[in-house]
Amino acid sequence: MSQNDPSGRPRMTTTAGAPIASNQNSETAGVRGPLLMQDYQLLEKLAHQNRERIPERVVHAKGWGAFGTFTVTNDISQYSCASIFSQVGKTTDMLARFSTVAGEAGAADHERDVRGFSLKFYTDEGNWDMVGNNTPVFFVRDPLKFPDFIHTQKRHPRTNMRSATAMWDFWGQQPESLHQVTILMSDRGIPQDPTFMNGYGSHTYSFWNAAGERFWVKFHFKTQQGHRHFTNGEAAEIIGHNREGYQEALFGKIEDGQFPRWKMMVQVMPELDAEKTPYDPFDLTKVWPHSDYPLIEVGEVELNRNAENYFAQIEQSAFSPSNKVRGIGYSPDKMLQARVFSYADAHRYRLGTHYEHLPVNAAKAPVHHYHKDGSMNFFGHKSGSLDAYYEPNSFGGAVEDPSFAEPPLRISGEAGRHPHQQQMDDYTQVRALHDTVLTEEERGRLYKNLAAAMEGVSDERILDRVLAHFDAISPAYGAGIRAARAEMAERHRHAAE
Ligand code: NDP
Ligand code: HEM
């Protein structure tokens, strides 16, 4: 039987492949009669609809993505033996997903928030995921505080609304967050679309080279489109008539052949320097100043192909910092180490046991392992031999290769819950950003954005506590926010009269 009907279009079938005679009418007892229980076509259609939604990501639920290419433009083999960097001109297929952090899957795209910046490189030695943000630092430095922090960004359990009180209560008691809060409340808090922002690996990762030397590394992805942002007012106006502005822009640009590009750059620190820097180089709330560790060019990311199916390729994409390849490793950053656990665990819940065999997540390099069975196993087993389902075996199954071993890392220290709160300088780098990097106009907008974000805080003591930290960062910073709050209160008074 031909698979097509006489007009050349494919025949519609059941999921079991049997052609369907009618997709317009349910099976009923007579024209006016009730349904027949045997109308499996109807039952299956309703059952499938009930399963169209999967759990949204617990954070970064709203996202936009596309496929692309990474091209090496500079030789960094002295730092890393990763195959992806092995030759200038080498290209690797990749996927990018951008996101907001706090909003649900239906959130408006132009909300003020940190943006996720996830990249999956399908390298010839396995997948390397760079799951970063559009900011070089993060709110907390200890993963024990991550769920608490996220609770303050999500809805209040009783009101089911987001709570400015919770946010500022938390930030005031975790002053290491004020570096990230400053960036979030600066112009960079609302990029016009994902092509107009930088990406950062944020954590310190590691490189090792063919001689087994280790380096600490920070990844930067510099937008080649330039930085463009919206103010709170402009964003509110856009959201009023278009909640999907990022999807429209990213999808539209790629359809039109305007392929967005980012330069991949790295800062590289020799392994032993980590003992000398005045800041903890593994503290995610800190950057490495460019003057100490200048940016080194690596290559270029270009996004040039839209997904054919958003759900299959973007919603079902699964990024994880645990996906690393030879030549690229972790670091002692506690946050990074917790993420090594958290993402794959989230994917098993959100997508299912064999999420890495879904086409968008599957490596393009050969995959051989001894995991067996489990829901959705459509590949049998992947040991490389039909009779080898354990290891070691005498039946030709896949074997380890010691040449992929990471050089050993020397660590020491007393096991314990070491308090870091009082030991760290949480002000100096924020002061540099406020006093030196931002222009006067940018500082003015920063104060206004902060004052707006503080509206609705129910307890003045919460604001006093956090303002004391802003004063300690820079007296001008605290004074600027207070002045902006006073101006806002004055405007509200006028409006009420
Ligand atoms: P530099 O003057 O060499 O670098 C300043 C950096 O600030 C540039 O990378 C610039 O990014 C970035 N920047 C400009 N405006 C903003 C903003 N509103 N929000 C976030 N970043 C912004 O100085 P240092 O390296 O000595 O760093 C000084 C301070 O700059 C740091 O304490 C940190 O707050 C901030 N910063 C530092 C980064 C680093 O990796 N060293 C990275 C990003 C910020 P671009 O070049 O893309 O415009
Ligand atoms: C998504 C946990 C810190 C960037 C997620 C998800 C979890 C998670 C569970 C959802 C994954 C999914 O369902 O697919 C954590 C934990 C952290 C942490 C436990 C700290 C201990 C960070 C940091 C960054 C980051 C520091 C950036 C530097 C992202 C991004 C996504 C994400 C970009 C979306 C990934 C995608 O596009 O699918 N995080 N996170 N997270 N996180 Fe984190």
Image (cartoon, grey):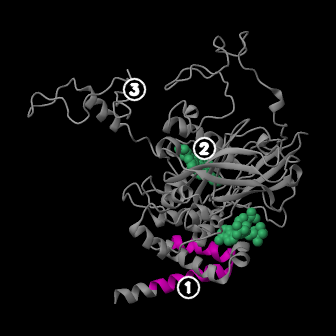
Per the model, the C-alpha gap separating discs 2 and 3 is 38 Å
Tell me if residue 127 comes above or below residue 429 in the rendering.
above
Image spot of residue 222 (x, y percent): 70, 62
**Residue visible at 43% across and 67% down?**
239
Mark 2 C-beta to ligand 2 under 8 Å = yes
Q: Which mark is residue 319?
A: 2
Residue 492 in magenta stretch:
no
Badge 3: residue crowd in 10 Å (few <14, some 14–19, many ≥20): few
Q: Which mark is residue 3?
A: 3
**Residue visible at 63% across and 74% down?**
470
Q: Is residue 228 or residue 488 the one in the foreground?
A: 228
Q: Is residue 78 or residue 171 the one in the foreground?
A: 78
Residue 481 in magenta stretch:
yes
Per the model, the C-alpha gap separating discs 2 and 1 is 43 Å
Disc with the residue nearer the chain's start (2 vs 1): 2
Residue 422 in which image quadrant: bottom right
| Region rendered in magenta | 460-489
Tell me if residue 305 comes above or below residue 458 in the rendering.
above
Tell me if residue 91 comes above or below residue 299 in the rendering.
above
Ligand 1 resides in the quarter of the picture at bottom right
Q: Nearer the viewer, mark 3 or mark 1?
A: 3
**Element type where label 1 sits in the image:** helix
Tell me if residue 346 comes above or below residue 492 in the rendering.
above
Quadrant of the frame with the C terminus: bottom left
Disc with the residue nearer the chain's start (3 vs 1): 3
